[in-house]
Image (tube, rainbow, N blue to C red):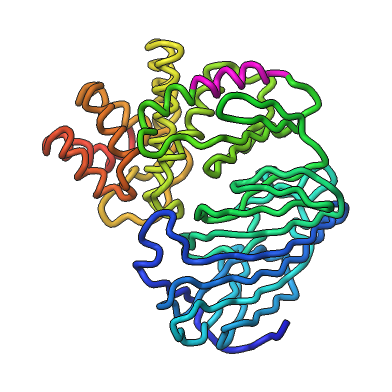
Amino acid sequence: MKTIMGALALTSVISANAAAQLGEPIYHYEGRMAADVETGFVDLDWRISVLDPDAESVTFLIAPSLQNIEVGGDVAGFETAEQGPFQAVVIALEPSTGSTRTIELGYDGILFPEPPNNEINAVAPDRVELSVDGFWLPIDATFQGYLTADLTVDVGAPWRGVANGTVEPLPTGVRIRNDEASLDIAFTMAPDFRVTEADGFTLYDLRDSDAGTDRLVEAASFCFNYLDPLYGETSPLPEAHFVIHRRSESAYNRRSYITLTDISDTEDEPLTQFLCHELAHHWSMGANFNTVENWLNESFADQAGNMAVRDRFGEDAFIERMNRYRARIEGQDLPPIWVPGATERRPYLVNYRSGPVALWELEVRIGRPRFSEFMRRYMTDPINTTPDLLDMLEDVAGREDRDWFEARLAQTAP
């Protein structure tokens, strides 16, 4: 692959309109990945189509352990630099002539010289699991670079795969296609899974036993039947694929691809809340996750899960859960959920505890019928910023309640 060198500033220029609409891709990735599961060595080659004709340069972030970076294609120059804990590949594009420009990008290396702290990402003999926080694929530094993808993963054996897209088995790996735009390519591959099929979803189990599987099926079925009638009129929940891992912590969601921890000893109430939370991200996922607005994605999905607990287990279970949330954040030195002009992404306790508590207090204030409409409007309308949310709340409940909620979001303690 031809390498072109140049001197560029560490910036990423993407036209505002290109990334404005959720799910509108500004890239298409075609990739090939070879992974040695014994050593953790990966070799990746990408052909990235830049769909924005106004883009002048792009900055991709990759893991610091990756090396032998080569860049070619419709590129005027590039440089690499440190950007926080990542390597930044800063690419100046050739001027657009109306046709789609392509970037050829390759690199290799031991992706994880040390095991990741969150246990999510791995290139190992028992599984290959990769997502955005492994920075194994080039991630647009704006974290708004939605992409479609066609990726072949070769592990040297006929492993099975589950992903946030369609998966085609190959003699020595899989082919993953993402036709719906996403911020990354997330997948799990393993020599085999124990598979359980149910109405609306399939379980892919990496554990050695089926402990808790029956309760998981029951809880997931409840969540489908609870959430879809509320929010799925125009965009129903798709067929879901749950991967049950052996680890005790760290789970995540990518549309219909949902990873779970070992659920053997998880009680029915938290299991229901978690599953409904993750499924609710089908609708609650449009805000920029790398900014303060991520509270919308997480707090609304989490409160949907809490309301599902109320519907399945009763009012007392719901109140007890919300009081635990309140107790968890009392006395903590936390920033406000949102104030005008804020940009920085909030910590876990704000997005997953303070936000749901504020939503609960809003429900108590305006009543369940209007709060249900507020939740429905948020889930079904393209509301991705807090100012838009407040405008919608004013439409549902009036100016006084809008102002109260804006002030509530600005508080630093419940």
In the rendered image, residue 115, in percent from the top left (x then y), is placed at: 75, 49
The magenta stretch spans residue 214: yes
In this rendering, the answer to whether 58 lies above or below 20 is below
Question: Is 221 situated left or right of 167 in this image?
Answer: left
Picture quarter with the C terminus = top left
In the rendered image, residue 295, in percent from the top left (x then y), is placed at: 39, 43
- By secondary structure, the bulk of the magenta-drawn segment is best described as helix
Q: Is residue 380 visible?
A: yes
Q: Nearer the viewer, residue 84 or 149?
A: 149
Where residue 113 sits, quadrant-wise, is: bottom right
Q: What residue lies at 41% left-to-right and 41% top-to-bottom? A: 284
Q: Nearer the viewer, residue 149 or 261?
A: 149
Q: Is residue 350 visible?
A: no
Question: Is 401 situated left or right of 412 in this image?
Answer: left
Q: Which residues are magenta?
A: 211-222
Question: Is 339 situated left or right of 139 in this image?
Answer: left
Picture quarter with the N terminus = bottom right
* The furthest residue to the left: 399
Where residue 30 sits, quadrant-wise, is: bottom right
Q: What residue lies at 28% left-to-right and 57% top-to-bottom? A: 341
